[in-house]
Image (cartoon, rainbow, N blue to C red):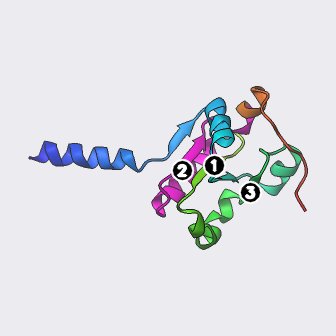
């Protein structure tokens, strides 16, 4: 009986975990999906200087908890999260998941890999 409960908890836990995507899969999702939010969790300086994925929203991971109420309206959308290397976005993805977001996707190797793959990047801060 204990094994059955443990297995069930494991399956349930996995079904709510955010998903790591490589750059090409992340880009494909951006191209194919209409109902998505692209969330950049780096600093404003990184967003401006190092470039960002087009149509991304900047909310640095350090202040993400302050914006969780504002993001509530996007719970039904797919949230694609990225940072420089995938580390901060992994933390942010886990935080979103813990706050009830069920469709969270993390760019596994960050914008470093995205740029290495030659995928689109914009520079400057949107006014």
Label 3 packing within 10 angstroms: few (<14), some (14-19), many (20+): some
Q: Secondary structure at mark 1?
A: strand
The part of the image, by quadrant, that contains residue 43 is bottom right
Label 2 packing within 10 angstroms: few (<14), some (14-19), many (20+): many
Dot 1 corresponds to which residue? 81
Does residue 55 lie above or below 75 as drawn?
Answer: above
The part of the image, by quadrant, that contains residue 73 is bottom right
The part of the image, by quadrant, that contains residue 113 is top right
Residue at point 54%, 50% (across, down) = 104
Q: Which residues are magenta?
A: 86-112
Q: Position of residue 12 (x, y in %)?
A: 31, 49
- Please name whichever residue, 19 or 91, is drawn nearer the observer in this view of the structure: 19
Of mark 3 and mark 1, the one earlier in the sequence is: 3
- Please name whichever residue, 86 or 106, is drawn nearer the observer in this view of the structure: 106
CB atoms of marks 1 and 2 within 8 Å = yes
Of mark 2 and mark 3, the one earlier in the sequence is: 3
Give the position of the C terminus as an image quadrant: bottom right
Q: Position of residue 112 (x, y in %)?
A: 74, 34
Calculate the distance from the C-alpha at mark 3 to the C-alpha at mark 1: 10 Å
Q: How many marks?
A: 3
Dot 3 corresponds to which residue? 57
- Please name whichever residue, 16 or 28, is drawn nearer the observer in this view of the structure: 28
| Mark seen at residue 104 | 2
Residue at point 41%, 50% (across, down) = 16
Question: Quick check: 83 left or right of 104?
Answer: right
Does residue 97 lie above or below 113 as drawn?
Answer: below
Of mark 1 and mark 2, the one earlier in the sequence is: 1
- Please name whichever residue, 97 or 46, is drawn nearer the observer in this view of the structure: 97
Residue at point 64%, 69% (across, down) = 67
Q: Position of residue 62 (x, y in %)?
A: 67, 61
Q: Position of residue 34 (x, y in %)?
A: 65, 50
Calculate the distance from the C-alpha at mark 2 to the C-alpha at mark 3: 15 Å
């Amino acid at each position: 009986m204990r094994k059955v409960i443990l297995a069930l908890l494991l399956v349930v836990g996995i079904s709510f975990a955010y998903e790591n995507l490589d750059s090409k899969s992340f880009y494909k999702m951006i191209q194919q999906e209409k109902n998505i939010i692209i969330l950049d969790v780096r600093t404003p300086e990184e967003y401006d200087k190092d470039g960002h994925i087009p149509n991304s929203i900047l909310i640095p991971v350090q202040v993400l908890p302050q914006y969780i109420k504002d993001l509530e309206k996007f719970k039904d959308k797919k949230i694609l999260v990225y940072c420089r290397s995938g580390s901060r976005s992994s933390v942010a993805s886990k935080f979103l998941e813990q706050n009830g977001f069920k469709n969270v996707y993390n760019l596994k190797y960050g914008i470093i890999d995205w740029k290495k793959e030659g995928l689109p990047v914009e520079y400057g801060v949107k006014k």
